[in-house]
Image: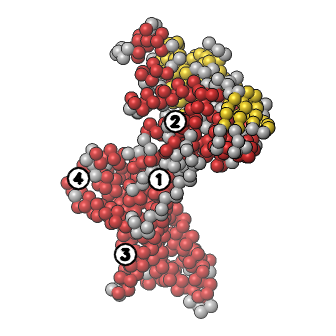
Amino acid sequence: MSAPVITVRGATQVFGSRTIFRDVSFDIAAGEVFVILGGSGCGKSTLLKQMIGLLPPTAGEITVAGHSVRTEVEQVRRQIGVMFQSGALLGSMTLLENVSLPLSVFTDLPAATCAEIARLKLGLVGLGDAAALLPSEISGGMLKRAAIARALALDPPILMLDEPSAGLDPVTSAGLDKLILQLRDTLGTTCVVVTHELPSIMAIADRCAMLDAKAQGLIALGSPRELRDHPAQPMVRAFFHRETL
Amino acid sequence: MPAELETTPGRITLRGALTARRLGPLWPRAVRAAGEAAGSALEIELSGVERLDSSGAALILAMERRHGGEVRISGASTQAAPLLAQLRAVAPAQAPVRAKPAKRPPLFAGLRTKIAFFGDTLLALAALPAQLRMLRRADFWRIAERAGQQALLLVLVLGFLIGMILAFQSAVPMRQFGADLYVADLVTLALCRELGPLLVAVILAGRTGSAYAAELGTMQVNDEIAALTTMGVNPATMLVLPRIGAAMLVMPALTVAMDAAGLAGMATVLAAFGYPLSAIATHIAINGAAGDFLQGLGKGLVFAAAVALIGCRAGLTANGGPRAVGEAATAAVVGGIVATVVLDGIFAVITYRLHL
């Protein structure tokens, strides 16, 4: 494994008297597609929020490209692009304007050039013809792809995606999986994906970390095939073989 | 290393990091240089490029487009070549064209739907006895509490201040004619018959009408209204009628509070001018006709129904995300105030013709 770009050491999240997870540790290498998986309520999205600096860990330390998410959150955010579960596109802007926004705010490129680049990004995710539409005028799959285009606007080395396939049909979901792999291959983007969609996990993940609500933490770490073929825990086996416990 | 450009005849050499954050000064120079080389073959040399992201690749495509002729890319890294190929495949054939802004709808475009909504609500009211199970008592009292009890303090403060201002502004000129005690008659008539219900309706439009629109608009945007409809629940029965009922229930109480607070404000000013409170009370009792007061209450009921109906309609016709909710709230306030004033004018004509 090449040098890690993200390190998670002893990450813990407690809300009041409720422990979501404790002592979660793993590394993510550059250019890797790393999937955080687990059942509903195990803290996948909470861990992602810690990694993007939206939620300080109750205990433990997370670094992204060498910067601590506690003390250097601005530097962390210069390294990442985030796609939220809902897409979180700004409803009053067209897709082109949504994707242009980071370019116009964080570069000194003129507006027309930002729009030109944004149009290419939309083309990359297959939305070149939908640039003038508003988020309310497009489907869920298009919304997610547009959100990825916006996350990619500044070509961040790390892309974090929260449930990219949730609520999508298998064909659209497979298209998104292909897009994530393309980004890794052509732009060298490190992708951290939170999902519990088994077909997506098997298609895209180089490695995965599995969280479990009952165990309140990490219960498995490895490639999806390792976890599927040699599950060390009943929960891992149940997840990968679609069994009940 | 910052992005750099060097031009020689037939060749443009790019160096450094061609990334979104560093392209700003380089972009226009590079594209212009490519344009100046038009008409002859051009080589874009990339061996000195340390890093190329998709914005940098977009620059190279822009240079190719501006040149318009034969362009050869040399020295591209193993990462850059497939990225350029991928972007070239999705690049639009023409420069982006700004979408035309949507045409403004004609002024009375929504009139038909407004009338239809009013009709639907009337039908829901007519069918209500058979659909009482759709009404939720707890919701009704929650809506009434928000519209009434939580607005009471605002109504009392505004009423008191309006009464004071009216009394003061009338008393000063009327004093020149020795008629300043008649300010009590004037303010009583103005408040009970006209200003009381009108001001309460404006407050209702600002607080309650906008809240109705935002609440129902959010439900509409989140498909909750569609879910109710598909369950066979009429949104007009379950959501609109309770809100209209709540507004009509609290309106008379708020109007009485506004009138009372206004009269108290007026009495404060007249007392400051030296009139005993007993004389002021006598003038109010003798000249304040019960008919004016009841007319104000009656008008208030109609205003409340109109404000609530417009607020609900604005919410239920919201379409298109969070912006639509904001627009619905604005439409509810503006529509509620306009409707109140128009209805007040109609009442003025009717009461004049009927000598009321």
The residue drawn where x is 44% and y is 69% is B107
Residue farthest to the bottom, as pictured: B177
Q: Is residue A80 above or below residue B242?
A: above
Classify mark 3: residues with Cα within 10 Å, few (<14), some (14-19) or many (20+). Answer: some
- Amino acid carrying mark 1 in the image: Val
Q: How busy is the neighbourhood of tag 4: few (under 14 within 10 Å), some, or many (20 plus)? A: some
Judged by depth in the image, the label closer to the viewer, 2 or 3, is: 2
Disc 2 to disc 4, how far (Cα)?
Answer: 50 Å
Q: CA distance from mark 2 to mark 3?
A: 66 Å
Q: Marks 3 and 4: same chain?
A: yes
| Three-letter code for the amino acid on which mark 3 is drawn | Leu
Residue in the picture at 41% in, 45% down: B222
**Cα gap from disc 1 to disc 2, whole angstroms:** 30 Å
Give the residue number, with chain letter if any, for mark 4: B131
Q: Are marks 3 and 4 in contact (CB under 8 Å)?
A: no
Q: Are marks 1 and 3 in contact (CB under 8 Å)?
A: no
Residue B29 horizontal side relative to residue B237, left or right? right
Q: Position of residue A223 (x, y in %)?
A: 51, 13
Q: Where does the image place residue A121, in percent across and percent down from the top left?
A: 57, 38
Mark 4 to mark 1 CA distance (whole Å): 29 Å
The amino acid at mark 2 is Val
Relative to B251, say whether B62 is above or below: above
Across and down, in percent, residue B253 comes to 41, 65
> Could you say which disc has been placed on residue B294 in the image?
3
Q: Which residue is mark 2?
A: A125
Give the labeled residue for mark 1: B325
